[in-house]
Amino acid sequence: MNQPIIPGMHPDPSVCRAGEDYYLACSSFEYFPGVPIFHSRNLIDWVQIGNALDRPSQLRLPTGTASSSGIYAPTLRHHEGRFWLIVTNVAGDGNLLFHTEDPAGPWSDPVRLPDVRGIDPDLAWDEDGNCWCTYAGVGQVRIDPTTGETLGEPRGLWSGTPGAHAPEAPHLYKIGDYWYLMIAEGGTERGHAVLIARGPTVNGPFEPCPDNPILTHRGTSHPIQNTGHGDLVQAPDGSWCMVLLGVRPRGGTPGWHVLGRETFLAPVRWVDGWPVVGELGTDSAAPPRPTVTEPVRDDFDEPDLHPRWISLRHRPADRCTTEARPGWLTLRADGGSPDDPDVTFIGRRQQHLACRARAAIDPTEGSGGLVVRLDERHHYAIEVADGQVSAYTRIGPLRSLVGSAAAGPGEVVLEIAIAEPRTPTDSRNGPDVVTLGVVRPDGTRTELARLDGRYLSTEVAGGFTGRVIGMYASSGAVHFDWFDYEPVEAAADDDTTKQV
């Protein structure tokens, strides 16, 4: 099926099982709240049950936090009735450890680990109850998880192929008679790969698998690329699977991925004491495609926002609220536009290659709109201000007005639609076409701009994130009655709408 189990920007997955239940955590970078937590009973159908870091005391992301900085590569583990989460905040706080009895939250305030220097930290407990933290590099040190104190000196372990780029994402497992050390190498781009080694103790020495890498799509034409950063989990029936990240590049050469790194699943079987990874989503051992669907519309009728909604770096209650006008989301401006790192913004990850997002906005007390963003320097926006609807692009240092129309009185419905290009096999094509438009009360759609999606891709913008679609305020206060997001058939874009 070549489909992710958790689509959209959900990279660096880490999974654990407690009884019949599976839980999974992902990186969240500069977005608040951080570290989305998912639950499943079958490893295929996942529901987001919360965000582990949902309070400022847990997650500090100053306004100056760069895009693609912030929260990196969590490890989620269940040990002796408690859930543990270790993660790196590269925006300044370093490695942090959290715990809870209920993965839906609340999670504890952070335990700091100032002497654990590497990113991508892992947690494993040996037979004597010692807790070991292994990190990118690959190094290891014993820690006290309740205090963050390191116990003893760090040591180097096996680091994959000699001279290989970026040995990272280590995970340790006790399986049968061996301790297994699984890592990623090759960088998180097209050269990404998963390797494994085994040894008699948690400290090694580790011998590499003779068939390394056990997973990579580098040098292939597979529709899923950049595969790596895996984590193993055993089902109650004794079978094994791996969760991992990958991307779905589209368009011509060199190929662009726009949804960020997504979470995929692969079956694992054991041969002669080594894991053999099956095809992603196509092996006969893999269950069918996910069946869980989310509601199209959020009417903002509940006092608390669904955990899928994320903001940039923080979310002050006075700038984002459903209480000012019941049944509406009110955003009060701080930064002036999506170009600004402190813009008041709330959005959700784009999770489908072809989709449509709409929002109804009342701009009578301010100005704002709808934006699809990769970062402050790469986004497309449609904004209502002073009776006018304007479409803007920001590509690197350039900000351009690319279309406008009269807003009309009262509530305005804005739309962002994303589809394949008309000639998807042209080697010069970008991955998709993004259109910005207005939907009139009679249902007529007026298109203000039709834009090449390649400029909102990781290959152009750099970094580690994917697209997020959402609402923002640029001045005063703006009120949003509802927000719709839905996948559409992956048909090529057409010229059936009215253009201005």
Image (cartoon, helix red, strand yellow):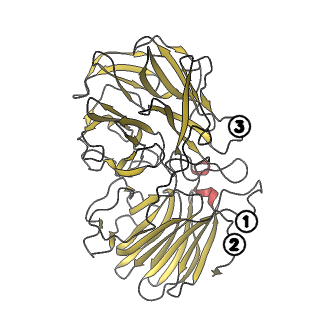
* Kind of residue at disc 2: Asp
Q: Which mark is residue 220?
A: 3
Lateral position of residue 306 relative to residue 145, left or right? right
Q: What secondary structure is marked by label 1?
A: loop
Lateral position of residue 78 relative to residue 287, left or right? left
Residue 332, quarter of the rendered image: bottom left
Distance, label 2 to label 3, CA atoms, is 32 Å
The residue closer to the viewer here, 54 or 67, is 54
Which quadrant would the C terminus be assigned to in this image? bottom right
Residue of label 1? 422
Q: What secondary structure is marked by label 2?
A: loop
Does any portion of residue 110 appear in the rendered image? Answer: yes
Residue of label 2? 494
* Kind of residue at disc 1: Arg
Please provide percent x and percent y for residue 257. Answer: 61, 50
Answer above or below: position of 396 versus 241. below
Answer above or below: position of 129 versus 27. above
Please provide percent x and percent y for residue 389. Answer: 50, 79
Circles 1 and 2, Cβ within 8 Å, touching? The answer is yes
Distance, label 1 to label 2, CA atoms, is 7 Å
Q: What secondary structure is marked by label 3?
A: loop
